[in-house]
Amino acid sequence: MKFALIGYGKMGRAIEQVITDQNKGDEIVLRIGEDNLHELTQDNLQKADVAIEFTRPDAAIGNINLCFSAGVPVVVGTTAWLDRLGEVKKACGEMNGGLFYSPNFSIGVNIFFEINRRLASIMNSQPQYNVSIEEIHHMEKLDAPSGTAIRAAEVIMEQMEHKTNWVLASPDKVKQNGSSLLIIAKREPHVPGTHVVTYSSDVDEIQVIHQAKTRRGFAEGAVMAARWMAGRKGVFEMKDMLSF
């Protein structure tokens, strides 16, 4: 398989390492970083079977549309652009493109989402528990809350009738109950990415925790999604590939 890597920072290099380690005779035909943006062209993209995009929110939409124009399915790991998902889905349909998007490509995180979906369904009939989310990331992460925390909140709200919106909050407000699902975002030096969903009552507490040890899990999930997307048209998520 021939890959195009749009974004050749830490994640791009981690993805390259996974492709190399898998030793399946694949080829990376395009690597786009800050120093060679001029090489991101339709002609160059058409040399690839699939593109993997990890860049910035302000660049993601343009990169996705360029992949559609080139007829190359694209796997997108960039976050903080999903407020324009409707627009991108429309463009995908109009250009007969292929899009795979996820706020987090870790298989473990997506199992974490599914666990929280099922737990929230149970907790919907247990109003004595208040639910909150805490996420901790390194200081370089720009968006807060993380896309993973937002997705976890959406999964929970789909199941809990009395939670209608999420709010970025300070830790001292966690005990407040109501229709808002509170997300606490922390940025600390040299920490693994951590997400904690807590259900707390007056008598006990239940927590579901995911902690990423390295970027490898995200990279492996992105490569798995890229292989799965080869030749596919339409819009897909991790739940489609993992059959949750």
Image (cartoon, grey):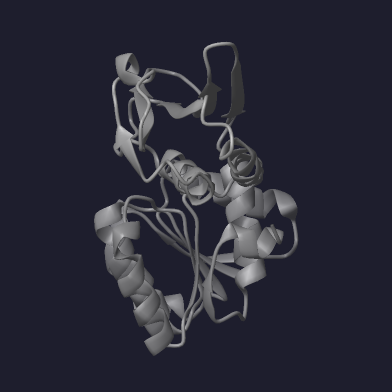
Count of picture labels: 0
Please give the name of the residue rendered at 57% of the width and 76% of the height, measured from the top-left corner: 49
| Residue 10 seen by the camera | yes
| The image quarter in which residue 153 lies | top left
Q: Position of residue 230 (x, y in %)?
A: 62, 75
Q: Residue furthest top?
A: 203
- For the residue pair 87 and 24, the one nearer the viewer reads as 87
Above or below: residue 35 compared with residue 140? below
| Residue 43 seen by the camera | no
Please give the name of the residue rendered at 32% of the width and 50% of the height, measured from the top-left corner: 80
Q: Give left or right: position of 243 versus 180.
A: right
Above or below: residue 155 compared with residue 85? above
Please give the name of the residue rendered at 38% of the width and 50% of the height, measured from the top-left corner: 79
Above or below: residue 210 compared with residue 153? above
Q: Position of residue 52 (x, y in %)?
A: 49, 62
Q: In which quarter of the image is the N terminus?
A: bottom right
Q: Where is residue 50 in the image (x, y as percent from the top left)?
A: 54, 71
| The image quarter in which residue 132 lies | top left
Q: Position of residue 170 (x, y in %)?
A: 29, 21
Q: Quadrant of the C terminus?
A: bottom right
Q: Give left or right: position of 154 versus 61.
A: right
Please give the name of the residue rendered at 41% of the width and 41% of the height, measured from the top-left corner: 163
Q: Give left or right: position of 12 versus 57.
A: right
